[in-house]
Amino acid sequence: MTEEIIIAGFGGQGVLSMGKILAYSGVMQNKEVSWMPSYGPEMRGGTANVSVIISDERISSPIINQFDTAIILNQQSLDKFEASVKPGGLLIYDPNGITHEPTRKDINIYKIAATAKAQELGISKVFNMVVLGGFLKLKPIVDKQYIHEGLEHSLPQRHWNLIPQNEEAIEIGKGLIEAVQTI
Amino acid sequence: MANKDIEARKQELLNQGYTEVYTKTKVLTDAVMHYCPGCGHGTTHRLIAEVIDEMGIQDKTVGVSPVGCSVLAYNYFDVDFQEAAHGRAPAVATAVKRLNPDCYVFTYQGDGDLAAIGTAETIHAANRGENITMIFVNNGIYGMTGGQMAPTTLVGMRSATTPYGRRVDLNGYPLRMTELLATLPGTYYVTRQSVQNPGAVRKAKAAIRKAFENQKLGKGLSFVEILSNCNSGWKMTPVAANKWMEDNMMPNYPVGDIKVDGKIAEGITAERLVLDHPLTVMQ
Amino acid sequence: MARELKLMKGNEAIAQAMIASGTDGYFGYPITPQSEVMETLMAEKPWETTGMVVLQAESEVSSINMVYGGAATGKKVATSSSSPGISLMQEGLTYLAGAEIPCVIVNVMRGGPGLGTIQPSQSDYFQSVKGGGHGDYQLYTLAPASVQEMYDFVFDAWDIAFKYRNPVLILSDGAIGQCMEKLYTRDYIPRWTEEERRQHAPWGTFGKPASRGHNIITSLELESARQEVFNLKLQAKYAEMKEKEVRFETINCEDADYIFVAYGSSSRIAMKAMQMAREKGIKVGLFRLITLFPFPTKQLAEVAKRVKGILCVEMSAGQMIEDVRLATECNVKTEHFGRFGGIIPTPTEVLEALENKIIK
């Protein structure tokens, strides 16, 4: 198993930390992982993206240009990465702020209204975990218990009290994801 | 004469009834100094060596020499020594002291090294309040490279690169590093001394002693500027050079303590810190 | 600190390895994409645990000279920076080499020239191995290709630095520095005791006991005859490194018709391209450089004899390729493929370059 993922959105949406929690969960499950962020000025308010690879084998390049899954959280990222999904791959997007829907016919497309749901429930801080939940529903590449360990390792100990809230958000996301196009 | 021979000869003379009035300190090596006769470096070296000897810290002292006339200072001091890149001695000494806090660490630099190419390192070491001693020999000129203008060259003073005299409109003003450093909270002792006569030498030695003693307190940087002639660079005899120094350097660079025990010294006014630079006429 | 499995960035790995390898001091200046090295050290506060000194200097010029001062006392002192900062350090590096001071310098490369870009690049190869500063000197240069190697090479660097009394450069890039991967940490090696320091660095300037003459650290020798002798001594040291300390990795080179030669993050991309080529039935191998100086000249020449073509992959306009061609004496078709200015080549591009430039 090798899953090559791009997560992309605005800086501040928790793109990098979502990737980190996923990667750390992979480490806990004894997988090979890599987490390669975009960095620089774009970290500070612009677009941010991170490539995460989770695999049973040694990872060759952490820098990749084709993805099994693209998790897209804004229009710029959709424009940039829709074409990078491998044929037969998966595209997940949050419809918030999306004006041009994805058009590929050779990939699976799902949407998750995580922004709206998180606002409705007043859990905007864990918006990214709602999205992660949607992804894990479709591709359960790491088990629940390892997600818990991944959260423990990703968050400083003083924030461990927030872990249950993060886990609830993941569960919410699993129920929120809906198919737009399946092939 | 080697140190051990000096010791033997001294005993011999004392046995003959002579009284000791002068002995070479053992903290200087037997190497023959390359400095020009009459230059202040030799005297300044000796004062530092005597202080190290008297304080009994030869085994704990690390010196840092600059690029410039005193680049070979490491050959003359019988203490562990590092030769730094041009201007970088304060950075080098910072690390020596931080990693070896029990050592007494001093830099020995000229005006080109400390006040031109190494200005940033000097100011930042002082501003961090490094517990080191910096000895700054100011002769208003680049001696080793053949008498070019230094940041400390006086207005009107001739040098190889200011053959018609330093012009403010072209070269700016002489830089008073010592006054500048005194305004930084990181400095604990800042003084300007000279070594052109026995009285000045005694005061300079007391200042150097204080600057080394201060390292025990851990309260910040001690900075001793020593005015020196550069008789070769100024193209004068040593005696004339010392006279010229008193008449021209000292009005620009007044001698005395500027900051003592972390406080601006008595009598040092704002006007004193920002003196005008009188036009110097060099024959 | 015992052996543990962690997920961390290459830059953090450098910092953690410095603490764990008993480094005595770190002096640095912020520059993207390596600022996490000093940030991690400052957050870890090793001065409270191991006694390591960490100081933010006013410039890279100052930090490399702090390395000079600290390391010349026989302690393990390191710095890190990225390309423009490393350019500023070149004066210090030639002084360190000339005064034979062991130390570790990390360059997390970004694209140039000038201020260039903050994105990854590998265009400092010439600067690193051909001598970025003046004079005949060499830095032992290690090129990590993973976060684990960022960590492990710090330990290796100390061994080499003190064995040869020579600065060691760890030449990485923004991709490896920013990338997070799995990492097995090592047991903490205590900082040297006073006695160990004296034993490992009897030449150090830490205060002269009555029992010895004064130690002098300098790179100055005004007598030309003596300076030549000293230069010959340095050359003999570099020759010994070439003989004994070459490191490289070969993957699938045994049956290969073509090989990629690459180091650092390019070697990871080349590895992916190699896998893609093999899926297409093209027998491709990878010769990965681990030491850039000493260059694995003989070993590469040996492999090159058996192949039809070599593609050098480097995020530059083609620097390493000169040493590859020297090693093979141009006996085999050798071309360069690279992107630069902060663009990272994709495995697809690398494979296409192999097909277009070498196989055709």
Image (cartoon, coloured by chain):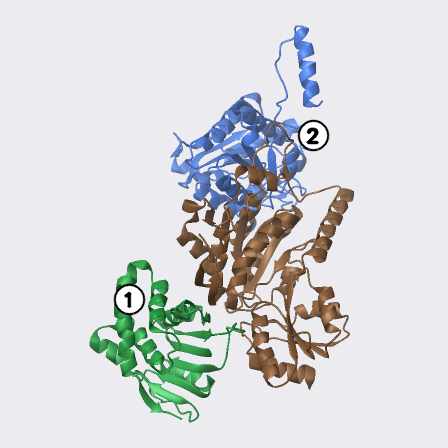
In this picture, is B225 found above or below C143?
A: above
Q: Is residue A32 left or right of residue B280?
A: left
For the residues carrying marks 2 and 1, which lies nearer the camera in this image? 1
Q: Check whether the beta carbons of the residues at disc 2 and disc 1 lie within 8 A of each other.
A: no
Q: Secondary structure at mark 2?
A: loop
- Between C297 and B178, which is closer to the camera in this rendering? C297
- Residue lying at the far left of the rendered structure: A121
Q: Position of residue A165 (x, y in %)?
A: 25, 69
In this picture, is C189 found above or below A178?
A: above
Dot 1 amino acid type: Ile
- The shade of chain A is green
Q: Is residue C231 left or right of residue B258?
A: right
- Name the residue at 54% across, 31% down: B60
- Name the residue at 61% across, 23% down: B25
Q: Position of residue C330 (x, y in %)?
A: 76, 73
Residue A86 in sight from this viewpoint? yes
- Name the residue at 64% across, 58% down: C132
Q: Chain of mark 1?
A: A
The quadrant in which residue C245 appears is bottom right
Q: Is residue C1 left or right of residue C248?
A: left
Q: Position of residue C27 (x, y in %)?
A: 50, 50
Residue bearing the label numbered 1? A163
Q: Chain of mark 2?
A: B
Q: Secondary structure at mark 1?
A: helix
Q: Residues within 10 Å of mark 1 (few under 14, many from 20)?
A: some
In this picture, is C193 found above or below C177?
A: above
Dot 2 amino acid type: Ala
* Chain assigned brown: C
Residue bearing the label numbered 2? B31
- The shade of chain B is blue
- Between B207 and B40, which is closer to the camera in this rendering? B207
The quadrant in which residue B180 appears is top left
